[in-house]
Image: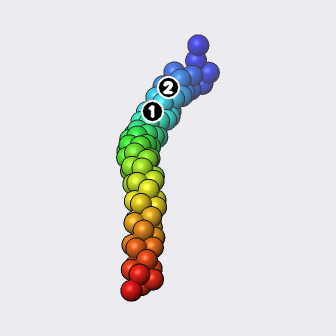
Amino acid sequence: MMLNGWSIPTIWVAVIAQATAAVWWASSTDQQVEQNSVKIEQVVTNEKHIAIVQVQQIEIIKDITDIKMDNKEIKNIVQEIRLMMTRWDNDS
């Protein structure tokens, strides 16, 4: 099958063009996969940081609760001291 001597060279040119396009597409796809892998790694790292911050927030909330309880206790102690001081002033 030869039309003026062009059919075999034309087929080879088409095959080479297709092969070149396939290599170009594969390299582009590989680059995209690599970029996606980097982004996925960043997401995993971010999730770890988020988990750490969440644990820290839980501990901070516990600390705040403890501080509030301590403040109530201190307020009660100060109130008792005030009452005692008032009694002493009245007794004198």
- Badge 1: how crowded within 10 Å, few (<14), some, or many (20+)? few
Give the residue drawn at x 45%, y 83%.
Answer: 90
Q: Which quadrant is home to the C terminus? A: bottom left
As drawn, the residue found furthest toward the right would be 3
Look at the numbered discs 1 and 2 and tell me whether their residues touch, using CB distance below 8 Å.
Answer: no
State whether residue 4 is above or below residue 1. Answer: below
Picture coordinates of residue 58 (x, y %)? Answer: 43, 47
Amino acid at circle 2:
Val
Give the residue drawn at x 40%, y 54%.
Answer: 66
Foreground mark, 1 or 2?
Answer: 1
Instruction: Please tell me in which quadrant of the rendered image residue 77 appears.
Output: bottom left
Q: Say which of 82 and 42 sits in front.
A: 82
Q: Which residue is mark 2?
A: 15
Give the residue drawn at x 44%, y 56%.
Answer: 69
Helix, strand or loop status at disc 1: helix
Amino acid at circle 1:
Ala
The Cα atoms of the two marked residues, 1 and 2, are separated by 16 Å
- Tell me if residue 57 can be seen: no
Helix, strand or loop status at disc 2: helix
State whether residue 12 is above or below residue 65. Answer: above
Picture coordinates of residue 14 (x, y %)? Answer: 54, 28
- Tell me which numbered mark, 1 or 2, is placed earlier along the sequence: 2
State whether residue 31 is above or below residue 7. Answer: below
Instruction: Please tell me in which quadrant of the rendered image residue 60 appears.
Output: bottom left
Specify the label residue 84 is tagged with.
Answer: none
Q: Which residue is mark 1?
A: 26
